[in-house]
Image: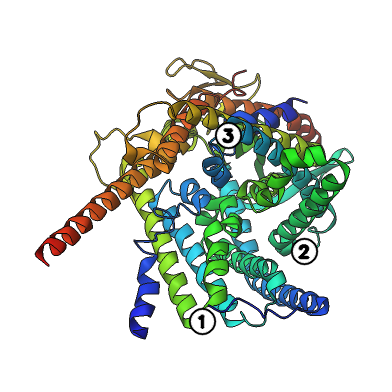
Amino acid sequence: MDNLLWIFISALLVNNFVLAYFLGLCPFLGVSNSLETSARLGLATTFVMLVTAVCAWLLNTYVLVYAPYLRLICFIVVIASTVQFIEMLIKKLSPALFRAMGIFLPLITTNCAILGLAIFATNRGYGFWEGIVYALGAGIGFTLALVLLAGLREESELSDIPKLIQGTAMNLIIAGILSMAFMGFAGLFSHT
Amino acid sequence: MNAPGRQAPVSSLRLVMTLAIAGLLSGVAIIAIYESTLPTITANKARELREAVFKVLPGVEQMQALVYRDGELVAVEAPEKDEPVVYGGYDQSGEFAGYAIPAQGPGFQDTIALIYGYKPGEKMVVGMEVLESRETPGLGDKIYKDADFVGAFRALAVEPEIIAVKKGTRTQPNQIDAITGATISSKAVVRIINEAHAAWSEQLEEGQ
Amino acid sequence: MKQNQSREELVKGIWRDNPVFAQVLGMCPMLAVTNSAINAVAMGMATFFVLVGSSFLVSTFRHLIPKQVRISCFIIIIATFVTIADYTLLAVVPALHKELGAFIPLIVANCLILGRQEAFASRHPTKLAVLDAVGMASGFLLALLSLGAVREILGDGALFGIRLFGENFEPWVIMILPPGGFLTLGVILLFFNWFKTKKDEFLEDVAAAQRSEG
């Protein structure tokens, strides 16, 4: 139990996917200009991450034991097709849910955070539950970073900023400061 | 600008065939590179492990992987996946010299993986080497860069369990000076060894 | 004219359309592995190999790949090259491979590579495609190297592991930590923007001067 909690907190705060591992930066910088869109993208990403964790576990347990060298190709192909399948399923079953996060699904599949999750979970030898918890932590952590940046950007639109620094340069600097703040979470689990 | 492929409708058979051929060729290429690099990679890994074991157990020249099965330590060629393993070290004349025990646990940033040498007769740690860590450069990474800290593991009693104390206040054989500015990382290393010792000590006693 | 075009395809990636500074592509590996110059170079070389290799294959077989499955084919080709790079690095330089860790497989997800296949290699003859890939990859390598060098000098007081300052230098540790990556790239982009603005102003001035003369 202790171990699962450590995995969750570690993925959520200490080793936040965006702010410590730089994964999923494209949506982080591209989409995070409104709070609502960010929250929905975060939700969709968390969902895809959970699917990925299950796929990666299945592949690792049943396929890749025999052919470790096919890991990368298997991950990409299986994750992409599973997400596509689920997208169709959601479209059929719940149009409301599809409207909330459906449009993001194809975009997310090619996101490095998703592939990163599968690879990190494999490298650390996570089992089924550990993988699920890790995906949950990483997904919520991603959402958190996205929502925080979106909030800061909405604020900054009202202030008077030199034209030169507007855009990506400023987002990166904001992200740097956020990342610094998140470093404060390091060591949460080392105090005994 | 000529768009890729032709505008005319393409039969699904051709689509499937293209993907199948691409997959096949890529598979062949990957297997070729895997097979041709595998010997080097395996040799590299084995050498790294051997060097680490020899470093934490001074004077050792041979090693043997040991696992605990059905109440005793058995020598194995390669441990099964996820099976805890220790390495027995033997000196030049083939005498048993001690165990090298790999262990890991949470550090300041991420998991710290290390290996330590242990002499069961004296209940002493005789060496420690960090294998993997993402501790803060300049601060936490002193757990393997600080010569005093690493050196302190060359003679350290593990019973009662190791205690990290403030630098310069060490009085007992089971105490170790924590690194100034890297207290949490030093304590993490100590805790990882204590936990591994608690898990292994009885099994290693029985295995004698 | 033909000669000019080839040179143009090669050069544009290095500065004007630099994948990182001008297009802001391929950021994940960009920031994650640039905490030292040597890591940055290794990552840049691996990306170079993958990008040039896949561009060559994609443009050579561009008439054979049906449009409907092109993205899947591109990804298979890229993933194959990445796997090759991964195993080669693991066999030849295991210590460096350990440092780069999981970020080598993540080259697959680098939008720069797939982007070049879709936008350029699949529509141009082999020679131009390779030149374009070499240019873009060099630009990427250059960007990685400048970021890695800045971060290593400030954060560790060294370049390629060689000490640059005396004993009294207090390293600016934050620079080799994640926040340093964001901040350094932010500042470099700022400089790039400033340079571009200045250049545009200069060109306008020149044009205005010419108009008044004529």
> Which percent across, then down, holds residue A126?
75, 42
Dot 3: element: helix
- Front-most of residues B81 and B10: B10
| Chain of the residue displaying label 3 | A
Of labels 1 and 2, the one closer to you: 1
Which residue is located at x 71 percent, y 62 percent?
Answer: A73
| Chain of the residue displaying label 1 | C
> Which percent across, then down, holds residue A77?
74, 60
Name the residue carrying label 3.
A146
Dot 2: element: loop
Which residue is located at x 50 percent, y 54 percent?
Answer: C26
Name the residue carrying label 2.
A67
At label 3, which amino acid type do we have?
A: Leu
- Front-most of residues A11 and C62: C62
Q: Is residue A17 left or right of residue C65?
A: left
Q: How many marks?
A: 3
Q: In the picture, which quadrant includes the C terminus of chain B?
A: top right
Distance Cα–Cα, label 2 vs label 3: 37 Å
At label 2, which amino acid type do we have?
A: Ala
Name the residue carrying label 1.
C126
Identify whether B115 is placed above or below B163: below
Residue B47, quarter of the rendered image: bottom right
Along the polypeptide, which appears first: circle 2 or circle 3? 2
Same chain for mark 1 and mark 2? The answer is no
At label 1, which amino acid type do we have?
A: Thr
Dot 1: element: helix
Q: Residue furthest left?
A: C213
Distance Cα–Cα, label 1 vs label 3: 40 Å
On the question of residue C105 being in view, the answer is: yes
